[in-house]
Amino acid sequence: MTRRKASSLKHFQSYFYMVLLLLPAALQARGLPEFTDLIEERSPAVVKINTVEKARSRRSAPQRQDIPEIFRHLFEQRQRQQQPQRQARSMGSGFIISEDGYLLTNNHVIDGADEISVSLLDHREFDAEVIGVDERSDLALLKIEAKDLPYLSFGDSDDLKVGQWVLAIGSPFGLDFTASQGIVSAIGRSIPTENNENYVPFIQTDVAINPGNSGGPLFNLAGEVIGINSQIFTRSGGSNGLSFAIPSTVAKEVVRQLREKGRVDRGWLGVAIQDVDSDLAASLGMSKPVGALISQIDPKGPAAESGLRAGDVITKFNGYEINTSGDLPHAVGRTQPGNQVDAKVMREGKEITLEVTVGSLGGENDQVAGTRANMGGRLGVEVEEVGDRLRRAWNLDGGVIIKRVRPDSPAAKAGLRPGMVIVQMGFKAVKDVEGFHSIMSELPAKELLPIRFFVNGRPVFRSFSLPE
């Protein structure tokens, strides 16, 4: 190699190394985010949630055939009393939303838990009380007894755009207060639940979300919570770059209703819907396949009363564009029950506008206002009357719905939780709140007693014992 070529190569290498040194600053100048301040300022309000669900060993025991089926659970319970207990533990994430200790997480993080504890970044730990849950949005509002806590503020998820940077903080696989970042990949994703309900327009991101992140906050660059991490798409159990968060606009309304009345009511139309494909669009006189096609209508529902018909295609509702059938439940669900809104409809090839009065889809805790039981009572529950809608849906002829359960109470130890409907205590049927109190006052202490309740429409027997 000549001396001139060697000198040129040396100059090139020097230039190359200089570019490498300046590259981070250049990237920073182009607007790539720096997350260190956000993480340092917001992490103290993020919490790790630990739950314990008590279970019993499954050792088999001889079955007595002379016991009526309705009482067999009690006999089996007495047999299991002598068997060792085991505990199922799980964990998730959450975040504090007020300085007096209200915090938010996913319902599936605490569902079925007998004990819930909350750990802060400063190593303080608290027992948590369930204020209310909303299964449809997969959110749960908890409360810890503390003051002057760091807390997070909600941003407006309606302002999100695809491509924006976002950050998650949580406890994936139990690794406390882990941060991960990415971008918004899509907005308004429809993911029906196992009950085929679809009331959450999920935010899709490529943030690394793993088991344990559930319930944790998703931040924008301003440090505002614009989502609650809830689900991932995975074949391996870990992150595949597809994660879904509940929008803050949904969460704020759920929190408001849970704090005010312990349940969440949503708008309801009373229709069955489907997507419109290109062939259907042509047959319906539409220029393109958009909207939600009404395939069936409840003759006594608000849609029928407002003049909607089977065969109508809703393309706009209360100002929201309805491009697919999944968009309609999102728009209806966030509309206040009782409001009159405009619906743009394609009917027989013509576009018309109808004024629709939105009905109420009651929460899982679908009750009317009633007298509440004392949380300090013997069973440790707060109950209310069962609403007519839930009574019909679950085919109930009485009962009381659980509003709250006191931690470490006989009710909590029996596995009771908000949303369940108690229909029998001891050997007496529970018809209403007054009957619940009357029966409770007569039950003996320190005896194993049966309790029958409904959960998600399914009857279950358990046993409980009251203190002196």
Image (cartoon, rainbow, N blue to C red):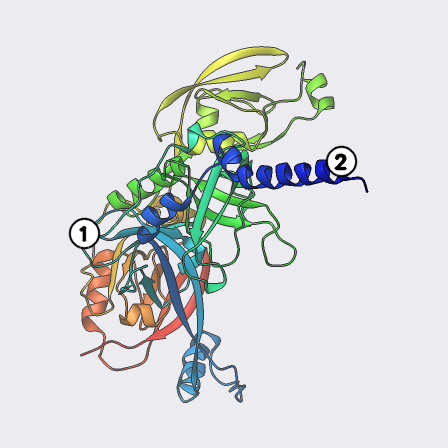
Q: Which residue is mark 1?
A: 148
Give the answer, above or below, for where 311 lies relative to 64: above
> In the drawing, does residue 302 fall left or right of residue 98?
right
Q: Amino acid at mark 1?
A: Asp
Give the answer, above or below, for where 449 lies relative to 61: above
Residue 306 at x, y = what percent? 44, 21
Residue 84 appears anywhere in the view:
yes
Badge 1 vs badge 2, beta-carbon distance below 8 Å: no
Residue 136 appears anywhere in the view:
no
Count of labels shown?
2
Crowding at mark 2 (Cα within 10 Å: few <14, some 14-19, many 20+)? few
Q: Amino acid at mark 2?
A: Arg
Residue 87 at x, y = what percent? 43, 76
Residue 250 at x, y = what percent? 40, 38
Nearer the observer, 273 or 215: 215
| Residue 4: numbered disc | 2
Nearer the observer, 53 or 366: 53
Please give the name of the residue rendered at 24% of the width and 53% of the height, measured from the top-left corner: 101
Of callouts 1 and 2, the N-terminal one: 2
Q: Secondary structure at mark 2?
A: helix
> In the drawing, does residue 305 fall left or right of residue 399?
right
Can you say which quadrant of the picture contains the C terminus?
bottom left
- Distance, label 1 to label 2, CA atoms, is 71 Å
